[in-house]
Image: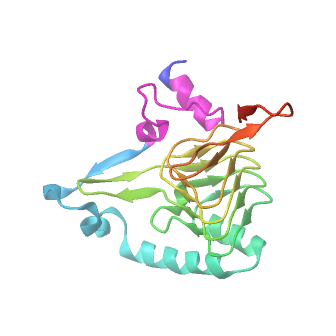
Amino acid sequence: MTTDDEADAHRAGDGVADGGDGRPARYDRVERHPTPSGHNSLRYWTDARSPVTVALNYLVVWLIRISPSLRLKSWLLRRLGATVGSGVSWGLEATPDVFWPERIELGDDVIVGYDSVLLCHEFLQDEYRLGDVVVGDRAMLGANVTVLPGVHIGADAQVAANSLVADDVPPGETVAGVPAEPVERETGDGEQNEN
């Protein structure tokens, strides 16, 4: 595939594993913004995003975290600019990115477990990075999962509780751990098989 074809495959949820050079594909998708004078980028967050926008986002995110109503959660996520499919279940205390929630895309019937976090930004020493988080139809994220910027999780994928998703998850794959890696499953004949 060409680079454009790989990008289209990611958007379609076909799950190309890396950017061709061994690095996770998310690194090729994130936008990099250098900071002045080599200082840590968090010092300059107000240059990157309006403090008023972040404060308003924070209030809405707080409501999303504590509301028991799935319908209200989806409505509030959409008000923040996130793309939210039908039938999305957003767990209690789960947190969308407060700075750039509009970079989150959730397919139909996605489950985001209790206390999970979907990050669309990384504040680093010399730069900050932005990347869309895309979760395909019927994908499931267990409790306390952290998804890093630029990660695409394919349709019907499963992420185990307490995992750090630092790379794309192909459709139908089950991953677990820090960082999340494919889980091996036993086949009917007693052999181990990667999902």
Task: Name the residue at the right extreme.
Answer: 188
Of 118 and 78, the residue lying toward us: 118
Relative to 79, does residue 68 appear above or below in the rendering?
Answer: below
Residue 170 x %, y %: 64, 37
Of 94 and 144, the residue lying toward us: 144
Residue 47 x %, y %: 28, 65
Task: Name the residue at the left extreme.
Answer: 37
**In this rendering, position of residue 50 left or right of residue 15:** left
Residue 160 x %, y %: 66, 55
Residue 53 x %, y %: 44, 72
**In this rendering, position of residue 129 left or right of residue 19:** left
Of 123 and 61, the residue lying toward us: 123
Q: How is this picture coloured?
A: rainbow
Task: State the residue at coordinates (27%, 53%).
Answer: 127
Verify whether residue 9 appears in magenta.
yes
**In this rendering, position of residue 105 left or right of residue 110:** left
Relative to 140, does residue 25 appear above or below in the rendering?
Answer: above
Residue 31: image quadrant is top left
Inspect this view and state whether residue 172 appears: no
Q: How many numbered circles are shown?
A: 0
Task: Name the residue at the top extreme.
Answer: 1
Inspect this view and state whether residue 177 appears: yes
Task: State the residue at coordinates (61%, 30%).
Answer: 9
Verify whether residue 13 appears in magenta.
yes
Identify the magenta region: 4-29
- For the C terminus, the quadrant is top right
Relative to 191, does residue 68 appear above or below in the rendering?
Answer: below
- For the N terminus, the quadrant is top right
